């Protein structure tokens, strides 16, 4: 987590208001504000170091800083809490209504808040999880609907392919039968043409002509002197 560079305080004094008890050995940098609301008090023990621009406000209880605790620049202490001895808070640390154990080291920019607010966080997380679950359910329902639609499309495509295959398998038989019918018709037409041509080439009195020629040859053979 990147933190902005702390600027030097323009306030060269320390402001103290309300019931505040400070040990004489406490080291206080410029710009520190100590504010104890009515009915509350701030107690700072010996050896404590308060960094530049630290703000401590006692509200709904007392704020007590144990001996030799160190608060970095820009720390905010608010509410009622106890900072344990030898505790070290980095710069820009916020502590709200929670105690810091002795010897704890809190990184810069950290926030220590009221633990009772976790219930709200949990409820918000639960609502977020419920919303995410609903989104996931909607996604799964959409996916299942799409899968069913795809299955139906695949089934329809298979049926269409099977029907086309059946029609294709039936077509060769039909074509074969049509070819046979056409060849039979062609043969009949050829026979009719041959018959007609033979009838045209044969003269109508061919039998009489053949018989006459034969008789003439026979007479020539029997009576050759008639032809002399």
Image (spheres, rainbow, N blue to C red):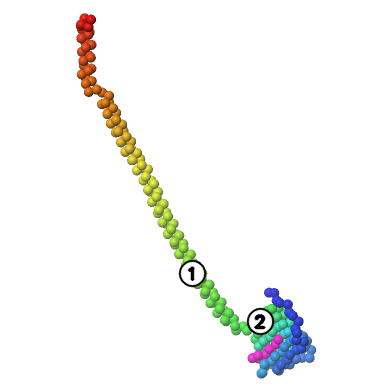
Q: Residues within 10 Å of mark 2 (few under 14, many from 20)?
A: some
Taking the image as drawn, is residue 88 in sight? no
Image disc number at residue 147:
none
Q: Position of residue 216 (x, y in %)?
A: 21, 12
Q: Position of residue 64 (x, y in %)?
A: 70, 89
Q: Give the position of the N terminus as an image quadrant.
A: bottom right
Residue that label 2 marks? 112
Does 45 sit above or below residue 141?
A: below
- Viewer-proximal residue among 18 and 107: 18
Q: Is residue 76 left or right of residue 223?
A: right
Q: Position of residue 222 (x, y in %)?
A: 20, 7
In the figure, residue 12 lies in which quadrant? bottom right
Name the front one of labels 1 and 2: 1
Taking the image as drawn, is residue 147 in sight? yes
Q: Residues within 10 Å of mark 1 (few under 14, many from 20)?
A: few
Does 85 sit above or below residue 131?
A: below
Q: Main secondary structure of the magenta part?
A: strand
Please tell me which residue is depicted at 42% across the width and 59% down the height of the picture.
152
Does 57 sit above or below residue 184?
A: below
| First of labels 1, 2 by sequence position | 2
Q: Is residue 77 in the magenta section? A: no
Label 1: state its secondary structure.
helix
Image disc number at residue 138:
1
Instruction: Find the magenta span and give its range.
Output: 55-63
Determine contact: label 1, label 2, CB under 8 Å: no
Please tell me which residue is depicted at 70% across the width and 90% down the height of the picture.
35
Q: Is residue 180 left or right of residue 26?
A: left
Please tell me which residue is depicted at 20% across the width and 6% down the height of the picture.
226
Q: Position of residue 52 (x, y in %)?
A: 75, 84
- Viewer-proximal residue among 180 and 43: 180
Q: Is residue 57 in the magenta section? A: yes
Alpha carbon of mark 1 to alpha carbon of mark 2: how far?
Answer: 39 Å
């Amino acid at each position: 987590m990147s933190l902005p560079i702390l600027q030097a305080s323009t306030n060269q004094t320390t402001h103290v208001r309300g019931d505040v008890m400070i040990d004489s050995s406490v080291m206080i940098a410029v710009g520190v504000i100590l504010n104890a609301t009515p009915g509350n008090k701030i107690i700072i023990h010996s050896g404590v170091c308060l960094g530049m621009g630290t703000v401590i406000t006692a509200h709904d209880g007392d704020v007590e800083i144990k001996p030799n605790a160190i608060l970095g620049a820009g720390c905010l202490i608010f509410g009622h809490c106890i900072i344990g001895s030898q505790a070290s808070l980095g710069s820009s640390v916020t502590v709200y209504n929670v105690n810091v154990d002795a010897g704890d080291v809190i990184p810069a920019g950290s926030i220590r808040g009221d633990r009772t607010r976790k219930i709200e966080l949990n409820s918000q997380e639960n609502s977020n999880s419920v919303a995410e679950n609903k989104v996931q359910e909607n996604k799964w329902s959409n996916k299942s609907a799409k899968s069913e639609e795809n299955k139906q499309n695949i089934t329809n495509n298979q049926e269409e392919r099977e029907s086309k295959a059946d029609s294709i398998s039936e077509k060769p038989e039909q074509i074969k039968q049509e070819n046979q019918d056409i060849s039979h018709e062609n043969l009949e037409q050829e026979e009719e043409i041959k018959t007609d041509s033979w009838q045209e080439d044969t003269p109508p009195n061919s039998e009489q002509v053949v018989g006459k020629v034969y008789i003439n040859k026979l007479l020539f053979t029997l009576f050759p002197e008639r032809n002399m």
